[in-house]
Image (cartoon, rainbow, N blue to C red):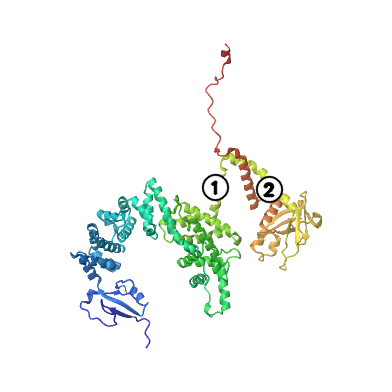
Amino acid sequence: MPQQKDIVKIAIQMPGAYPQLIHWNLPGPDNYALQYADGVQMYITESVSRFSAQIKLVSVLCVFCFPAQGRCAEDLFKGIQSADAGVRCDSLKELATVSTDVTFAQEFISRDGHLLLVKIVEDSNDNVIMTHTLTAFMELMDHGIVSWENLSSVFIKKIAGFVNAKPTDASIQQVSLDILENMVLSSNSLFLAVKHEVTMERLIAHLQDMFAFLNKKNLRQYIYKNIIHSSGSVQDEMAHYLYVLQSVTLNHLEPRMRMPLDCYNPEQREILHNLRQAAFETESENSLSHERRRSLCAKEFKKLGFSNNSNPGQDLVRTPPGLLALDTMNYFATRYPDAYSRFVLENSSREDKHECPFARSSIQLTLILCEILRIGEPPSETGSDYHPIFFSQDRLLEELFCGCIQLLNKTWKEMRATQEDFDKVMQVVREQITRTLSSKPTSLELFKNKVNALNYSEILKLRQTERLHQEETLAPPVLELKERLKPELLELIRQQRLNRLCQGTKFRKISSRRRQDKLWYCRLSPNHKMLHYGDVEEDVENPPIEALQEKIPVADIKSLLTGKDCPHMKENKGKQNKEVLDLAFSITYDVEEYSLNFIAPSRTDFCLWTDGLSVLLGREMSSESMRSELEILLSMEIKLRLLDLENVTIPDSAPVIPKPPSNYNFCYDFSQTEQ
């Protein structure tokens, strides 16, 4: 008869005996309790739901029949007060082990056992006794059943003495540091009490022994808090050690950063496929043929943003960031699965070339974070530039990555970026991260709030403001000089645009039959009165005006249209992508009944021609190219004009005119000299 799935066999093991599926006849069953025999030996309590969930994981569960929590707590409470040193030591040792169980801890603390341990610490000088006592005390207090506030000053001094002393017993000092961490983080009064007892010199000595602190977030928080309350000289000294601590801690990531992905490593390949499967809900791959499965994987890896979709591991051979990029992607996908799926699926549905590639972005972002955090670089002897967020956050790189990859997607949308703008977006994201970290956020949440508030438009404003400050162009005299120079420079740009139109440009036509017709050429006459145009062969670079059969008088041009307003874009509505729309412009003539339609070869040519045609029509130039060139010319001209004033502060206002003298009798009387 098959075993029912909802029935589990439980073997009971008595101390010193083998586990058996039998009934034990025990006198006084209330004095016994069940305890897990494997793994963490926790008591099995009346919490049936928790117990049921755990025992369903196995078919046979082996448990101890052990003295009940209350009886065990009573026995150990008496044992640690025994006059026999051996019994006392054994009881403390066992207490340090069983105190990890919250049910036992409640029983022991209800007998004021934790206060008894405090008394033992205050009175004992035996290292073995002290190690077991401190360990048991830390385990009991770690359950949060009682507050740290009621500790005596004698106990605090004793713990501080262990921290201040030169290492004699590493186990005592280690658990003392754990107790110290919890005390200083529980309340400000305890922090001040510990700060009074623990010397700064000893903290610096602990910092020099870096490896004891690599993963101790609480102690890092305490040390950082101590710096905030320190005087200037001590603060400067500690800042360097904190910088070194940060560098040494983060540099444990360097091996992953220097190691490329091994395409034959099954574990790494599995992570890549897990990233793909977590992003896309696909049909069962087991039912697909080999070719169909391979095609499906390649398609999904492409959507995921890998350049080499047939072998995505090739994207991770560059070091740095190497395997560290795979680690950060995997951390994001497993730690924040909803945000990961939203990122990938949102970009999978975007218009061609406008999707933000997750894999490519992640690889580059990991490299940027490594450079900002200086991972892999040895700490400088004089460096003191540390990040306070490091002292409150474990797995800093991975958590920063998770926040910044979502920021990257947000910035990508704000910039309306395409694949060609990838490097520009990454520059903006680097600037967002750098500026936010420079404000010294003290927590990950604060970092996320600040970096998300620093959107693309804010970055542009900051860049502009800094540029103006750098060039001292905020000073009224310099602003006035800019306004005087602007008409002259705008006229220079106008002449350049007209000269460019006189040189002419080769354009292409869009055919309704979805093929390209002959190329055609258009140029402005030297006297700026005629637009000459006509079909040309592909190998013709600069045809003379006489070879262009058609012409339009500039005086007959009525308007300039761009983008969707162009007649040839309206006729092919729905068939043109954004790239073509951004390059389209038209001129209308003969009372808007006729038009000459253009598709510029590039965005630069589009700006040159629309600016030039605007000049011919008596309008203001408005392209981004014109604004950029004007800014460059103004900057260069102002720098030339201010060369003689280098290192001279330009005042914001004119000097104050002094009051006139009370009289003007200050002319020297030469007549008296002559006498």
Would residue 607 appear left or right of 228 to someone viewing this image? right
Percent x, y of residue 562: 68, 57
Would residue 431 appear left or right of 508 to someone viewing this image? left
Residues 517 and 378: in front is 378
Name the residue rendered at 50%, 63% in the picture. 258
What amino acid is at disc 2? Ile
| Residue 40 visible to an observer of this rendering | yes
Name the residue rendered at 31%, 80% in the picture. 10
The disc at residue 493 is 2
The disc at residue 8 is none
What amino acid is at disc 1? Glu
**Residue underneath mark 1:** 466
Percent x, y of residue 590: 76, 55
The secondary element bearing badge 1 is classed as helix
Q: Quadrant of the C terminus?
A: top right
Residues 579 and 75: in front is 75
Badge 1 density bin: few <14, some 14–19, many ≥20, Cα 10 Å: few
> Residue farthest to the left?
83
| Residue 482 visible to an observer of this rendering | no
